[in-house]
Amino acid sequence: MTLLLQSKRDITKFQILVEIAAHQPNVRQSEIAHTLGITPQAVSEYLKELTNQGFAYSDGRVRYKVTAKGIEWITENTFSLRRYTRFILEEVISQVAVWTAIADESLQVDTPVYLYMRDGLLYASSEHEASATGKIISDVQKGKDVGVTDMKGIVDLPDVKIVIGKVPRIHRGGSTAVNYQMLKKLAKDRSFVAAIGVESLIALKNIGVDADVLFGAKEAVVEAAWHGVSAFVVSVDDELHSVLKRLEAEGIEYELHDLKV
């Protein structure tokens, strides 16, 4: 365990110093006290100690800044906490947590298995080699759900790209102003289709395609991408900005097509 976590006093001093660094120089003792859930008097005592240690200083107007020595102390403890967190995630949680997978074959309890994604779902197999491994916690038949523990490695995900088709709102023509030849081409063989806006839904229906999701489509597309599933999104033009902003925030690649004739 990192030394910082062995002292409640040091933990509080660390939190106070981080608050000062994040908001300096205009941070008040009362604001720090409110954020950390302690009294202003306690903050005052800790600040005196931090100042005496050379971690912080005041300009004399009850405004504090972190010194170079204080930044070094924050950095040192942050790296220590990160190492401890990595140990917990990789060595502790992986031993006791249980993930749910689908058995790709009949398996017996404690069988070492490989873990991999298919169509956005986690599968377990003793034969299908993959970079992630684990052990199943019970006997299971093929196609049934099973618990997996002692997971090691990273589950590989296929490359994901979101294809987006932009259609006009109703006052700009709606589904009657769509390039259906291009829409058919883009929608061909897509396993996951999302519609944003009624105009998009009708345009898809006009080519015989039912959208997999309409409500909450933006989040559904992002969550599908996290599971390695690419999507075809048909969006009305005035919702497009928020769609692209969401994808860019998650670092998800996309290609955009204007479907207006």
Image (cartoon, rainbow, N blue to C red):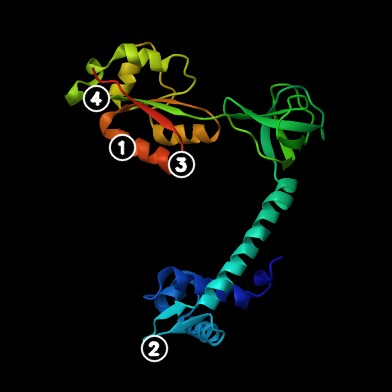
**Toward which corner of the image does residue 1 lie, by quadrant?**
bottom right
Q: Quote the CA–CA distance across marks 2 and 1.
A: 48 Å
- The residue positioned 70% from the left and 49% from the top of the image is 90
Q: Quote the CA–CA distance across marks 3 and 4.
A: 26 Å
Q: Earlier in the sequence, mark 4 or mark 2?
A: 2
Q: Quote the CA–CA distance across marks 2 and 3.
A: 44 Å
- Give the x, y percent position of residue 157: 59, 32
Residue 17 circle label: none
Q: Quote the CA–CA distance across marks 4 and 2.
A: 61 Å
Q: Earlier in the sequence, mark 2 or mark 3?
A: 2
As helix, strand or loop, the secondary structure at mark 4 comes to loop
Q: Which residue is mark 1?
A: 241
Q: Residues within 10 Å of mark 2 (few under 14, many from 20)?
A: few
As helix, strand or loop, the secondary structure at mark 3 comes to loop
Q: Which residue is mark 2?
A: 60
Question: Which three-letter amino acid code belongs to the residue tagged 3?
Answer: Glu
Q: Quote the CA–CA distance across marks 1 and 3.
A: 14 Å
Q: Quote the CA–CA distance across marks 1 and 4.
A: 13 Å
Q: Which residue is mark 4?
A: 168
Q: Residues within 10 Å of mark 1 (few under 14, many from 20)?
A: few
Q: Earlier in the sequence, mark 1 or mark 3?
A: 1
Mark yes or no: residue 216 visible. no
Image side of residue 194 versus residue 156, left or right: left
Image side of residue 168 versus residue 208, left or right: left
Residue 250 circle label: 3
In the image, residue 38 above or below residue 91: below
Question: Which three-letter amino acid code belongs to the residue tagged 1?
Answer: His
